[in-house]
Amino acid sequence: MFGYHLQEYDLKNELSVCCGGLGSVYMAIHRPTHRRVAIKKIKLDLIEEVNLIQQEIYITRQLQHQNILSYDTSFVNDLDLYIVAPLMVYGSCRDVLNYYSSGFPEAAVAIILRDVINGLEYVHSKGFIHRGIRASHMLISHLGTVLLSGLRGVGELIVNGRRQRVLHSLPPQAKDALNWLSPEVLEQNMLGYNEKSDIYSLAICACELANGVEPFADMPCTLMFTEKVRGYAPKLLDSITLSEYNNSDPSDELQAMFLNRRFSESFHQFVDMCSRREPSMRPKVDYCRS
């Protein structure tokens, strides 16, 4: 349906910048069908990690699921790569969070996580570790469905037809995702990491969605790393967790909002369970769905 010629597309307004400023995402009209699409335009002459983009396109085409962002087609024009995808009219969950400083209501977080977990379970079933679970990689369609994106950094557990138990390498562009990565990914030791590292990231993302900002956001990288390795668990901010701290300031407007709300016990348990220090103590993704 979608062609390989730039003339078939009418690029409209720029929606966001991507690839470290070397690319942009546009809303566009596919002229033959008059359908609105999203087009990612990447400057190939300036980007160094072209192989990562090739891998993203290749893996995205392998993964066909209602909660995974698909690519309709891709082509090169001059020195620019164009990737055509369905238009996510509401942007990412991170975009929407910018209008909710204290985070989303628990019911909204539950709906988002339901779709994310469905997509993540599919990713794991195909032998991949996502390694990039965060609100900016959760896109919202016109129907309100949440789709996982950010497949450029996925890790492959199946190599040359054989399944590996663990991976050891850091994901590409890890510096942009340090707050979401699990302790075992950051440690880079001989034990490696598996799909359970995504479960830890899921807990961080649950806090990001509910609190309005991810845990460790204002913390220096070295301190963040130390806290994770020591087993510090991220928390949902409400009257239960803030009452544990003596330095809570009720006069602070944002803290007052946190103190006046209370998340369910099951939500707290979900975050605690998924953010355990030891990967073996975290649930598998299919258990998270229940």
Image (spheres, rainbow, N blue to C red):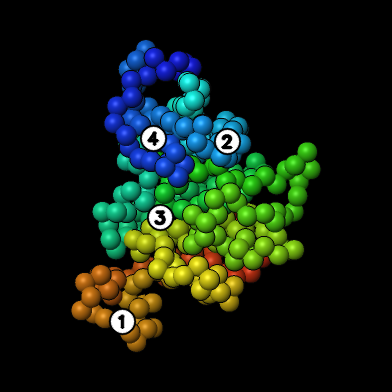
Residue at 42% over, 18% down: 6
Q: What amino acid is found at the position of numbered circle 3 in the picture?
A: Ala
Q: CA distance from mark 2 to mark 4?
A: 17 Å
Residue located 37% across and 62% down the image: 213
Instruction: Mark 1: give few (<14), some (14-19) or many (20+) Cα within 10 Å.
Output: few
Mark sitting on residue 50: 2
Looking at the image, residue 71 sits to the left or right of residue 165; the answer is: left
Give the spatial CA distance, label 2 vs label 3.
36 Å
How many residues crowd around disc 3 within 10 Å: few (fewer than 14), some, or many (20 or more)?
A: some
Report the residue that reaches farthest toward the bottom: 246
**Relative to 35, is 167 on the left or the right?**
right
Q: Which residue is mark 3?
A: 110
Identity, as a three-letter code, of the amino acid under mark 4? Val
- Residue 36 in the image: above or below residue 93: above
The residues bearing labels 3 and 4 have C-alpha atoms spaced at a distance of 28 Å
Instruction: Count neighbours of disc 4 (C-alpha within 10 A) and say few if under 14, some if 14 to 19, many if 20 or more.
Output: many
| Up-down relation of residue 196 to residue 5 (above or below) | below
In terms of sequence position, does the residue under pointer 3 or pointer 4 come before the other?
4
Q: Earlier in the sequence, mark 3 or mark 1?
A: 3
Mark linked to residue 25: 4
Q: Nearer the viewer, mark 3 or mark 4?
A: 4
Camera-near label (2 vs 3) is 2
Asked whether the residues under the numbered discs 2 and 4 touch, taking CB atoms below 8 Å apart as contact, a structural biologist would say no
Earlier in the chain: of badge 4 and badge 1, it is 4
| Foreground disc of the pair 3, 1 | 1
Quadrant position of residue 169: bottom right
Q: Amino acid at mark 2?
A: Val
- Across and down, in percent, residue 74 comes to 51, 25
Q: Amino acid at mark 1?
A: Ser
> Which is nearer the N-term, disc 2 or disc 4?
4
